[in-house]
Amino acid sequence: MYSEKVMDHFQNPRNVGEIEGASGVGTVGNAKCGDIMRMYLDIDDNGIIQDCKFKTFGCGAAVATSSMATELVKGKTIQEALEVTNKAVMEALDGLPPVKVHCSLLAEEAIHAALWDYAEKHHIKIEGLSKPKSDISEGEEEEEY
Amino acid sequence: MKKLIYLDNAATTKTSQEVVDAMLPYFTENYGNPSSIYEIGTKSKAAITAAREQIAQVLNAKPEEVYFTAGGSEADNWALKATFEAYKDKGNHIITTKIEHHAILHTCEYLEKRGARITYLDVDENGVVDLEQLEKEITPETILISVMFANNEIGTIQPIAEIGKIAKEHNILFHTDAVQAFGQVPIDVDACSIDMLSSSGHKICGPKGIGFLYIRKGVKIRSFVHGGAQERKRRAGTENVPGIVGYGVAAKRAADTMKERTATEIEVRDYLITQILNAVPHAKLNGHPTKRLPNNVNISFEFIEGESLLIMLDMEGIAASSGSACTSGSLDPSHVLLAIGLPHEKAHGSLRLTLSEETTKEDADFVVEKIKGIVERLRSMSPLYEDFMKKSQHNK
């Protein structure tokens, strides 16, 4: 059901862990839907993301999207990191099954939440970043038979 | 190839060789339609009669009370929908439980949209229904009580004889979904006052695509599938002769070997439960400790999610299942685990291992070792575990 890239990032997740004294930390998702992601960012004085780590409670896709998201934002500027959308994460993983698309939304949201925390701690405003939702779940409409 | 340790026998079982051997002649030699009058037709008919008798014997029922269907889900649908239709004059109220299989629950939802009133009984933390609540919910409009014999996820066996007694005293029909119980625990439809019972072939080393509904003589439900006169005009369609033959053999085999087989399974089951709980902290058994199916183990591991655990077990050659949302195709974890009072995060971290007669203690040791390592690895990645550890360090 998963692409080879998803399986690779699930089995060998990149950047798992915590960053002591991180510049920004964001936690999104909830236990109800079964996915919680926490993203740690280390941002230098020039606004470059020097390091990024994550911890995730969730399914294979949740782990893989978190792992890929950390890879995509590492070394980027804050503005570039904001452009890492759920689509970009999905494409980098060669796609996700339809029921797992919400995991990639969660990964995008986790980056935003960590950036928001960074902005609040440093009393700055990041252009184009709004306060992230802490709870992501798709309003799924089921078909009636 | 890596050795496969198949621990998902509640999902389906390996068809036994004896069953396959019995079925094969009905594909290429005795392929006649049982409704035909020539010899190979009558041979098929005789084979169905023999299988019906084999199954009736396991239940202490009469052969003419066994109606073959395409599986357990069809039998459940038939029992509920046809009872609702046939007993409309008496009432529209059906009592069932919160932990039924979706073949019951979704059928109930369908009937609710068509005027039925359904009561979903609670269960206690072990998954057992409350008989007092059952009695209290009965009204003059109650036409059916449907309670599963044993639960497919947590293995809990219900007090079926007591429920049957209550139903009988109130003159209400009693249906039980026995898909997991048939062939695993002794069932006597008379002693338990069961009016209808659903079962499925592939759960007991029989073939897929075959099941039956036991309908006690005198229960007035009508046909669910209309057409020819098969199954005493109650279930049309040319019979699945190889399936029925295989089911008969599987049922007989399950009954003949039950005592010895389940004694071994219970021993390995309890060994596996003890070993897992000893090896992994923050783990808990779900379901009743003793009143449970001989082959069912269901354990919740805190701070981790079930699908990740399943994928990692699969990589070790272990096939299992989970009540996590990801395995249900929705965002909600198992309704059964929520009904026994587990919070969402613990329900997401559940693992179901269902053994077969072939599962050994050596298999169990291998599985425990793998589970221990995988749970540790997933916890090291879990923000919930991180929070828990920080909290417990803080409290020291």
Image: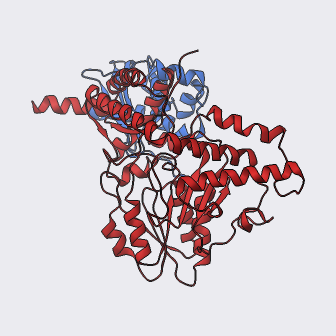
Q: Which chain is red?
A: B
- Which color scheme is applied? by chain
Q: Position of residue A48 (x, y in %)?
A: 40, 19
Does B60 sit above or below residue B256? below
Residue A143 in view, yes or no: no
- Quarter holding residue B367: top left
Q: Position of residue B29 (x, y in %)?
A: 84, 39
Q: Residue at x 78, y 58 (%)?
A: B237
Looking at this rendering, what residue extends furthest in the left direction?
B396
Q: Position of residue B168 (x, y in %)?
A: 44, 74
- Quarter holding residue A5: top right
Q: Residue at x 34, y 36 (%)?
A: A27
Q: Residue at x 64, y 34 (%)?
A: B18
Q: Position of residue B262 (x, y in %)?
A: 43, 39
Asked whether A131 or B41 is in front, the reply is B41
**Residue B64 as seen in the image, left or right of residue B273:** right
- Quarter holding residue B386: top left
Asked whether B234 or A73 is in front, the reply is B234
Residue B287 in view, yes or no: yes
Q: Residue at x 28, y 28 (%)?
A: B280
**Residue B191 as seen in the image, left or right of residue B234:** left
Q: Where's the C terminus of chain B, which quadrant? A: top left
Asked whether B379 or A109 is in front, the reply is B379
Q: Where's the N terminus of chain B, which quadrant? A: top right
Does B261 sit above or below residue B130? above
Looking at this rendering, what residue extends furthest in the right direction?
B38
**Residue B298 as seen in the image, left or right of residue B227:** left
Does A140 sit above or below residue A68? below
Which shade of the palette goes to chain A? blue
Instruction: Tally the marks.
Output: 0
Asked whether B311 or B268 is in front, the reply is B268
